[in-house]
Structures are given as structure tokens and as C-alpha cells.
Amino acid sequence: MSDRNLLEAYSLMRRVTPFGFDCGRLCGARCCRGGENDGMVLFNGEAELLRGIEGFEIKRSGDTEILICSGVCDRRTRPLACRFYPFYPLIREDAGKTRFDVVYDIRGISSCPAVSRQFKPNVNFIRAVRKAALWLARDEKNLKILRDTAALFRDICELNEKLL
Ligand code: SF4
Ligand code: SF4
């Protein structure tokens, strides 16, 4: 992993926020209140960047590195999964070109009001997520994470449709 790709992605997500208000006030920041079995999938290179930070524990599950946090962090050290949430860059590969659609993170449909009620995002946030994803996709391992997550999103959507 080129550090540059990851650092560009971090930098793009540094100053943007998903909405024009603090959505955490509506739900008590529910997305930061997971249990010890919840965690954020880390992109390639993030573990090296975040290891040793107080309140963070990094576990490995197969090829995947997962960050478990204490529910409180310094905003500047959040992983990309948290910087993107409640959105996610959904990869679309057409005719040899890689594009990203920034979508509500379907995994939050039952827990995150921003997802279930589709709060209107800041345009600059969506643009930053898309650009950050393009930097990440330059790395093969991260491309795989982005593809795997897109497949997971499709599976969840199909299951939801069947259950409706
Ligand atoms: S992203 Fe969703 S769960 Fe997290 S603070 Fe905002 S509204 Fe709450
Ligand atoms: S790392 Fe920070 S932003 Fe991410 S879930 Fe934990 S406390 Fe929330």
C-alpha cells in the first residue's frame, strides 16, 4: 500500500461532515456505541497508522483487520469507515473504468436515522468520499475490500427485498 493513497483519502475526509448539522445529537451517536464484537473494517495500511492509539484495539479476522473502539475517539484519528459513515462508496466497474456511487450505508438501515430517513447530505462530503475511494482503489487490497463490501450491500438489499 502506498502511504500516499491512504493519506490522500484521510486528507480528503478531514474537513468534511456528512450533514449541515450534528446528527449524533438526534440519536446519541448510536454508531459509536457498538459492543466488543462490533468493529470497523480497516483499509489496507490503516492498522499501521492507528495501532497503539488509546481506546483502539485491532483484531484480525482472516484477511480482514477490524478496529474495535471504546466509543470515544479523537476525531482526527477515526478510521475511514467512520469518516465515510453513514455513506459508503459503492464501486461500479464498467468497460475497464472504476467509478463510485456514494450511497447510504445499508448496514445502518435499522440503527441509523440518517440512513432510514435519508437525510440530505452535504455535496462536498459526497464528493470527498468519491475522491477518497478513487485513491483507495489504486491499491489492490483496498480494491478487494471495496468490491467485497459492494457485494455485501447487494446481498443485504436482495434479502431486504425478499423480506418485504
Ligand atoms: S451517522 Fe447515524 S447513527 Fe451515527 S450519529 Fe449520525 S444519525 Fe446517529
Ligand atoms: S472510532 Fe470514533 S468515530 Fe469510529 S465508532 Fe469509534 S468512537 Fe465512533
Image (tube, rainbow, N blue to C red):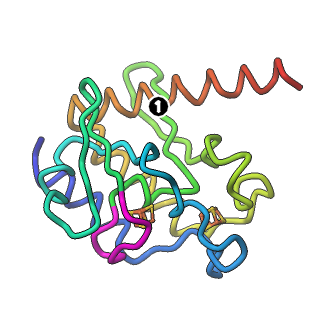
Spot occupied by residue 136 in the image (x, y as percentages of width and height): 28, 44
Q: Quadrant of residue 119?
A: bottom right
Q: What residue is rendered at 59% in x and 67% in y?
A: 123
| Tally of numbered tags | 1
Question: Residue lying furthest right in this view?
Answer: 164
Q: Is residue 6 magenta?
A: no
Quadrant including the C terminus: top right
Q: Is residue 75 magenta?
A: yes
Ligand 1 shown in quarter: bottom right
Which is more toward the observer, 131 or 121? Answer: 121
In the structure shown, which secondary structural element does the residue marked by tag 1 occupy?
A: helix
136 to the left or right of 19 = left
Which is more toward the observer, 159 or 67? Answer: 67
87 to the left or right of 117 = left
Spot occupied by residue 72 in the image (x, y as percentages of width and height): 41, 73
Spot occupied by residue 125 in the image (x, y as percentages of width and height): 51, 66
Which is more toward the observer, 24 or 20? Answer: 24
| Some atom of ligand 2 lies within 8 Å of the CB belonging to the residue at label 1 | no
Magenta-colored span: 69-78
Which residue, given by chain and number where applicable, does mark 1 sit on? 149
Q: What residue is rendered at 38% in x and 66% in y?
A: 13
Amino acid at the residue labelled 1 = Thr
As displayed, is residue 54 above or below residue 100? below
Q: What residue is rendered at 56% in x and 53% in y?
A: 87
As displayed, is residue 86 above or below residue 105? below
Question: Residue lying furthest front in this view?
Answer: 36
Which is more toward the observer, 99 or 68? Answer: 68
